[in-house]
Image (cartoon, helix red, strand yellow):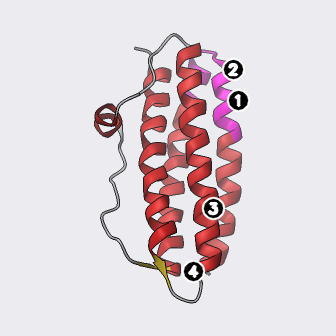
Amino acid sequence: MSKVIKQLQEIQANSHILYVTFHNYHWNVKGMQFFPVHEMTEKLYDAMSEVFDDTAERILQLGGKPLVTLSEIVAVATFKEETQSSFEAKEVIAHVVKALEAMLAGWVKLSKLAEEVRDTTTMAMADEKVAELEKQLWMYKATLA
């Protein structure tokens, strides 16, 4: 299996872990900032659903096999599931920042791997996600300041 496909699978697996994690935050945030954090986390889990699908489709385009079972996802994911079930808004945003920083690192790695093998389509996909995550991180970090 190519390094590009392996990295795409890692991103796919991690996006599913975050999909579930962001739902946890969505349902279990407490306090005065419930509504904005509830809405924010809905956008985040929708984005992770899109990443899960987009990476699976790119894996198929490259002749690989996307992850289709929970056991495969857990085996490949480098992120750990969130076991806590009650959160304050600031805590959620801090967790989101860490999660998105880790996703950013995965996309940066993918871009470099794709560049090495001149896979310009995957590189463009990764670079687009890098730009998107950098902007999101700026906004979430500004919220915490």
Which element type, helix, strand or loop, lies under badge 3?
helix
- Report the amino acid beneath label 3: Leu
Q: Which mark is residue 34?
A: 4
Marks 2,3: beta carbons within 8 A: no
State the separation of the CA atoms marked 3 and 1. 20 Å
The residue beneath circle 1 is 124
- Report the amino acid beneath label 2: Thr
Q: Please provide percent x and percent y for residue 2.
A: 44, 15
Q: Please provide percent x and percent y for residue 124.
A: 70, 29
In reply to whether residue 115 is colored magenta, the answer given is yes
Q: Camera-side residue: 92 or 109?
A: 92
The residue beneath circle 2 is 120
Vertical order, 50 against 132 (above or below): above
The quadrant the C terminus occupies is bottom right
Q: Which mark is residue 137?
A: 3
Q: Residue at x 44, y 17 (%)?
A: 65
- Report the amino acid beneath label 4: Phe
State the separation of the CA atoms marked 4 and 3. 20 Å
Vertical order, 104 against 89 (above or below): above
Say whether residue 73 is left or right of residue 32: left
Which secondary structure dominates the residues rendered in magenta? Answer: helix
Q: Residue at x 42, y 34 (%)?
A: 10
Vertical order, 115 against 30 (above or below): above
Marks 1,2: beta carbons within 8 A: yes
Vertical order, 74 against 136 (above or below): above
Marks 4,3: beta carbons within 8 A: no
Q: Camera-side residue: 10 or 101?
A: 10
The nearer-to-camera label among 1 and 4 is 4
The nearer-to-camera label among 2 and 4 is 4
Which element type, helix, strand or loop, lies under badge 4?
helix
